[in-house]
């Protein structure tokens, strides 16, 4: 079993950590709504392009294996 003083020390550590996290989050330069929408569109477009590329490769390999395996 842990000593009571150890448990209090851990609790203080967690509280201190949360305080530091909040302080750091206040320093963050958050994107504007316009930037956020723009970045979301870029990510969505990138996902669609990568999905299409994977689909094309998968279809090509499937046809190739059907030809090879007869």
Image: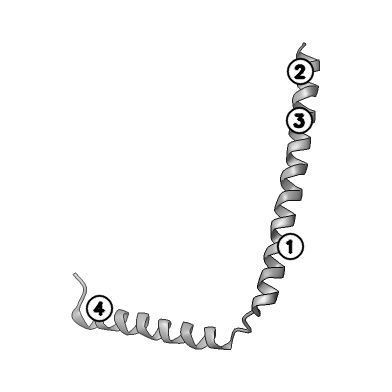
* Disc on the earlier residue, 2 or 1: 1
Q: Is residue 27 left or right of residue 16?
A: right
Residue 66: horizontal and vertical position, in percent? 76, 18
Indicate which label's residue lies in the foreground, 4 or 2. 2
Which of the two labelled residues, at mark 3 and mark 1, occupies the earlier sequence position?
Answer: 1
Is there CB contact under 8 Å for labels 2 and 1?
no
Viewer-nearest of discs 3 and 1: 1
Task: Tell me, for residue 7, which label it has, or none.
Answer: 4
Q: Label 3 belongs to which residue?
A: 59
Q: State the separation of the CA atoms marked 4 and 2.
A: 64 Å
Count neighbours of disc 1 (C-alpha within 10 A) and say few if under 14, some if 14 to 19, many if 20 or more: few
The structure residue drawn at horizontal position 78% and vertical position 23%, both measured from the top left corner, is 63
Q: Secondary structure at mark 1?
A: helix
* Residue closest to the far top: 70
Closest to the camera, between mark 3 and mark 4, is 3
Q: Secondary structure at mark 2?
A: helix
Q: Residue at x 65, y 80 (%)?
A: 32
Q: Helix, strand or loop at disc 4? A: helix
For marks 3 and 2, the one nearer the N-term is 3
Q: Nearer the viewer, mark 2 or mark 1?
A: 1
Looking at the image, do the residues carrying marks 3 and 2 touch, with CB atoms under 8 Å apart?
no
Applied colour scheme: one colour
* Residue on which disc 2 sits: 66
| Quarter of the image with the N terminus in it | bottom left
Q: Residues within 10 Å of mark 4 (few under 14, many from 20)?
A: few
């Amino acid at each position: 079993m842990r000593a009571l003083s150890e448990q209090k020390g851990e609790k203080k550590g967690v509280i201190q950590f949360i305080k530091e996290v909040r302080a750091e989050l206040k320093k963050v330069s958050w994107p504007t709504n316009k930037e956020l929408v723009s970045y979301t569109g870029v990510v969505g477009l990138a996902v669609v392009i990568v999905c299409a590329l994977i689909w094309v490769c998968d279809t090509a390999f499937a046809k190739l294996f059907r030809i090879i395996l007869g």
